[in-house]
Image (cartoon, rainbow, N blue to C red):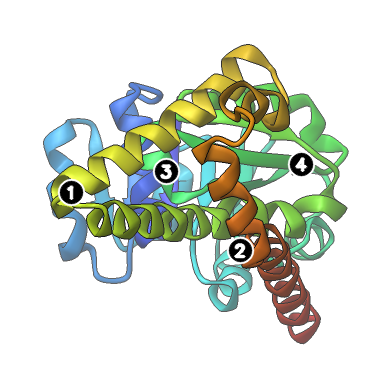
Amino acid sequence: MKIAIIGAGNLGISIAKGILNSKGSNYMYLTKRNPTQIYSFEKYGNVIITSDNREAVKKSNILIFAVQPSQLEEILVDIKDLLNSKHVVISTITGFSIAKIESIIGAKHHIILSMPNTAISVGKSMTCICSNKKGQSKIDLAKAIFNKMGHSLEIPENQMQAATVICASGVAFWMRLIRATTQGAIQLGFDFKEAQELAMYTCNGAARLLIDSESHPEAEIDKVTTPKGCTIEGLNEMEHQGLSSSLIQGIVASYEKISTIKESQL
């Protein structure tokens, strides 16, 4: 596959690393207004760095757009005359709908919306995808690309904003929980390095346990809570302090904010 990542900022670079580290492409273009910041990617071989989006589109068939929302329309207008039936247009831009992309380049093209998160750089992204009618035939291709860098799930377009909160913003939410656990471990006597190691690997193990067993969180909680034990004592205190309710309220607040952002772009 010949892949072009249009906009090698933080997310674009994470996607590039994920694809290259998983050997998901033997040929890649990376574009950026100031390409000097990403010349280090040339060490991978067969990676071409440029500020010329048109050149990247001409030489690639999978186009992954990772630019700012305010930049996408201008870029699509600039390259739309180069698009052909072999191109697959994959947008990672929050709030930029399929209908809006079709209004610029036409509905005859394969258009896919994707929502990866920054864990894609280490092959652990949760990526949600959807497509226009034409792009439905390329969904499996898109999933194959993103499955090399984690896990992908096809969902309806009207759920993409919610998925952005759970999966993209969710990385920050989980980081804060890991940090809080680390701070708790320090208070119990561990040094910072030990505390963070304990928190990270316990979090990783809990997620892996649910993925591999296909179990429910409460079923796994029941296995480690004994009558009058320390686990249930800690859980009850966390709930008394509002752990679950504050998480849910934070998720809803993020969703309300992203909905406001979308409305302002219409």
Which of discs 4 and 1 lies nearer the camera? The answer is 1
- Mark 1 or mark 2: whose residue is earlier in sequence: 2
Which residue position holds label 1?
Answer: 190
Which residue position holds label 2?
Answer: 76
Which residue position holds label 3?
Answer: 119
- Secondary structure found at label 4: strand
Between marks 1 and 2, how big is the CA–CA gap? 52 Å
- Mark 3 or mark 1: whose residue is earlier in sequence: 3
Q: Which amino acid does label 4 sit on?
A: Cys
Picture residue at 31% right of the left edge, 31% below the top: 20
Quarter of the rendering occupied by the C terminus: bottom right
Tell me if 103 is positioned left or right of 116 in this view: right
Seen as rendered, the residue at the extreme top is: 213
Residue 142 at least partly seen:
no
Q: Nearer the viewer, residue 162 or 144?
A: 162
Which of discs 3 and 1 lies nearer the camera? The answer is 1
